[in-house]
Amino acid sequence: MGELMSEHVVSTKVYIGIWAALMVLTAVTVGAAFIDLGAFNPVVALAIAAVKATLVVLFFMHIYYEHQRIVWAWVGAGFFWLIILLTLSLTDYGTRGFLGVAGR
Amino acid sequence: MHVSQATNTQHAAETEHVLLHHFGDLEQQRQSATLGMWVFLITEIMFFGGLFAGYMIYRLAFFNAFAAGSNTLDLRLGAINTAVLIASSLTMALAVHAAQIGARKKTVLYLLGTIVLGLVFLGIKVVEYADKFEHHHVPGQYFEFQEPVSLAHGEQAQGEHAQSRIDPRHAELFFGFYFAMTGMHALHMIIGVGILAVLTFLAWRGRYGPQYHTPVHNVGLYWHFVDIVWIFLFPLLYLISRHG
Amino acid sequence: MWDNLPLWPERAATFSGRVDALYIFLLAITGAVTLLVWLLIFYFVIKYRHTKHPKAHPVEGSLPLEITWSIVPLFMFMIFFGWGAWIYFLESRPPRDAMDVYIVGKQWMWKAQHPTGQREINELHVPAGRDVRLTMISQDVIHSFFIPAFRIKTDVLPGRYTTQWFHATKPGTYHLYCAEYCGTSHSGMIGRVVVMEPRDFENWLAGGAGEGSLAGTGQKLFQDLGCATCHRMDTAGRGPNLMGVYGKPVLFEDGRTQTADDNYIRESILNPNAKVVAGFKPIMPTFQGIVSEDQLLSLVAFIKSLQSPQNAPVSGRPPVPNTTSPSGAMQQNPGGANR
Amino acid sequence: MATVTHAIETRNYLNSDYGLKSWLLTTDHKRIAILYLVTITAFFFIGGFFAMLIRLELLTPAGDLVQADTYNKLFTMHGIMMIFFFLIPSVPAVLGNFLVPMMVGAKDLAFPKINLLSWYLLVLGGLLTLFSIVAGGVDTGWTFYTPFSTTFSNTYVTGAALGIFVAGFSSILTGLNFIVTVHRMRAPGLTWGRLPLFIWANYATAIIQILGTPVLAITIVLVALERAFHIGIFDPNLGGDPLLFQHLFWFYSHPAVYIMILPSMGVISEIIPCFSRKRIFGYHFVALSSVAIAVFGFLVWAHHMFVAGMSVYAAIIFSFLSYSVAVPSAIKVFNWTSTMYRGSIYYHTPMLYALGFIGLFTIGGVTGLFLASLGMDVHVHDTYFVVAHFHYIMVGGAIMGYLGGLHFWWPKITGRMYPEAWGKIAAATVFVGFNLTFFPQFVVGYLGMPRRYYQYVSEYQVLNVLSTAGASILAVGYLIPMIYFLWSLRYGAPAPANPWNAVGLEWMTPSPPPTYNFETTPVVTWEAYDYRKMPAIEEAPVAR
């Protein structure tokens, strides 16, 4: 609690650094899309997007400096629930037709 | 968690008009607001999550159609818009910083910058949408889809009975998602710009300072969240199978 | 009186007994637990009523008890799960040599087509003692094909085949319901399933028909639509040879494989170039909007019947594929009808 | 700040201000709770009216009372009204709104204006939905299955869907308010291990509201877009998959069942210790089982789709996961029952509802085990067995809990006692009427009677007549409290601050409470449900 309140004032240099990183990553993701990586094209694209999103969440959105652990927990829960939605939907779509019986 | 007694009295006068009756102190109020905003943003994750789930399933099922649809999008405009939005996130972050240190003029300027960048984004989006209307890429009655030449596999295209490999209905699904996802995103942007306008006015009136700038911070969180959605939308929509 | 108040549905298929056994087991276990809870409530409420027991005795919890009443139910649940999943798995896998019947649902009626050509509306005649596989599709909204006496039910979807099967054991007439809400006359989308002695069923089959077998209809359509021009019964065709393709894995151009089931055949007719067989070119036009669901089913039945002679189809006359008439006009429909 | 509100003893939130504006623009959580109470009671009786027409139609096998289309609209509107506009707001928005701040020792919820906004959103959503009823109704069933709802139904689907969309935001904002309040507004000393179980239950509910409701919202948006522009996401004619709708819909709508039942479980966890005069058995297990239900509740949605044409393997996975959510429910039932062991039990009306809740929820819960078992579900899916099962959970469970809680806290909310004898009569009537209505439906469901049938084969008639007879009794059972609650507002005996000698911060302030709940912020130094030093319950006066 060095500050007036527990809120952290982030240096503008950090912001500009993050912005530069985001711009570079945007260029990288566009570049990577033109290289044939087979099945890994979407993986790379999403990985870069995830890194960018993490940078935004941690620094622009101040989660890195957040003292309330519960905020961390809720942010984690949000992404975790999204993964529940995606993966459990895929248990259906990913295994359709495995049995070789129409519609099963 | 509790502000020390000395600080409390020191800022008592400044505190009184912003502290709501049911909170014990400003710190509690600020933390509540931050937590509340984050929980709200979690609902937004799940809101877009439903779209992402549908998109993922159909993209896996109809990859060719999605790739063909994606290749008709203007990558340059998409990339420029990504840069514009990231820049607007930077100005937003700087606006929050300015409010925290009590630089009123800077706060207003950065907020205005954010609004302008947001409007630029929306303007480019309008250009893109107009292009879709022109090419009948809007799902519905008038939808048409011709497979772009690059994908139509040269030698086969020369065959007398060459058929499109793409079911236009599946390309229509891609554009359905394109409009649903970017439309929802744009709607969030429009709401964001509106809120920013009010916020800029209040900042100009000197409402925010080191003691109290929760609205600036929370609107910032919202704006960054909208940025994050775009960070995912850009590769998902614009960058399918761009090579070869 | 009891005619008007049946308390147990009839058991008329092999699954009926299996499901009933599970039901009785579940009733017994859960009934016992429910009874225990109710009796305990009554016992405590009476024994410890405040007039007789004015001072509560502090009992705050018990870890062994908590563990017991977590683990024991979980163990029972796993039995419920395993038993139910086993029945479901049996219900999901029709025997290979099951007799086929094709069902088309539409608002608000059921159409059944037998491989021999008989068509029925809101009725389904089947022999007792035979495995019967239903391949089902809807022309409009989602329906659900439900025969309570057989304890089976599966949704009938638009755009995709679903399958279920049964083995009727008891001749008689049973209810047939649509179980998925489908609009105004949902409750009118009912019919009857007539289970007949095999001999009676043969007679019934002999009586109706007239239009030739379903596979025969499909074969005729196969010629009329010009399919035979490319899908020749040798290796020289521009499309794959379809002899014996049903039920086998198919290798696609992009390296993926898929078993050629009813849905694959349907998709290949309606959206032929989504999955192109390795070694062939994406030149087939779509038949979207050209063939009806009924016709699609007859085409599927025909392609199913194209098996090598030693395991000839169990139903219908094995058709002799006609490879000598390239006369069928090639019906090119570039683009086809989109809807 | 605390010095001003010294005035008169009887100054409370009800008489602190008068006039319509003081209610419609209030930010006091207690007044907003009253607004909710009035609103959802209206919705409840509208939904109940539809239910009565449904039961009357089913008195005879033939369709003779209303048209088939009308019947379809009736069960659709019954479902929509009861689920989205009564059950989901019921306990959280009325009792939760009133009690959450008081139970944590706060002056109000964290965001009072947002709290008022969420009431307006519910009203707006309700009006939109009512408008679509008046304009012609909706006939899709509350489940809105595609492609029927998107392509084939020509009723007011979009209007009703929009109403639900708006009401969804009401639910989200209520949940958000509770979460922040529980985290940031607890009185000093009120640790998580000392929180009332009602708070735990509402917190768990809020988790579901936050994480589930947005998925319903986007699904509704997609249905509306599909109706308006034919974008084809759920339309098989465009290559879309109708099962995707079901996945997204049930991702919310299965956990939504826990939105309805969890808060009622919280109510029961308050009532039983009070009328047994002892601490709840296994506090931590009851508390954590609420959270477990909220979390596991999200892993089981596709058990609504076992016969829908889903992959067999997915069905097996979801069947397995479905049993995971049954364990914490069982833990609760056993702990409530054990709480009464060696207690000192009073038979007041709230306790009767709580006992009824345990009994009926047990039946509803164990029949859920039937439905989670794949082979069983194939037969009973979409039959009256399912209808009976979820009414045992939602009416036998959620509404019993809501009524129990309403009686329990009525003296606190209004400052008046309800007539105890009538309360007992009503509770017994509800219990008998409920069982007569819904138990026969298990039997008729196993016989094979599909749900949403306007006419049915004659052999099911006897059971349907029993059910309709039960529904009439149930209707009377619901009208009696409505009457005596209104009566008590004028003629009921003034309630003391703590008529049940219950523990909990809400009982340590006058009835009705002052606007800011507490004169000074309480400091909690005791564990929850510490009834050891509380005196016995005195016979409360019934009327002046």
Image (cartoon, coloured by chain):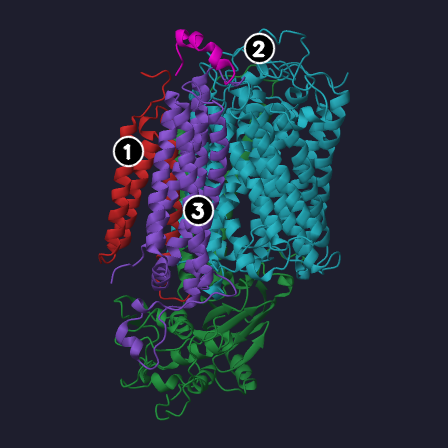
Q: The disc numbered 2 marks a residue on which chain? A: D
Q: Is residue C297 visible?
A: yes
User: What is the display colour for chain A?
Assistant: red
> Judging from the image, what is the letter of the chain drawn in green?
C
Image point (50%, 70%), residue name:
C339
Occupied quadrant, residue D35:
top right
Under tag 3, what secondary structure? helix
Image point (50%, 28%), residue name:
D178
Q: Is residue C194 visible?
A: no
Residue in the foreground of this view, choosing between D417 and B221: B221
Mark closer to the observer (2, 3): 3
Give the x, y percent position of residue D204: 47, 32
Mark closer to the observer (2, 1): 1
Kind of residue indicated by mark 2: Glu
User: What is the display colour for chain D?
Assistant: cyan
Give the x, y percent position of residue D476: 74, 38
Tag 1 residue: A16
Tell if the residue under mark 3 belongs to the same chain as the one under mark 1.
no
Task: Magenta stretch: give its range.
Answer: B1-18
Kind of residue indicated by mark 1: Ile
User: What is the display colour for chain B?
Assistant: purple
Q: Residues under labels 2 and 3: Cα distance?
A: 52 Å
Under tag 2, what secondary structure? loop
Q: Answer with left or right where residue C146 lies relative to residue A59.
A: right
Give the x, y percent position of residue B5: 41, 7
Tag 2 residue: D519
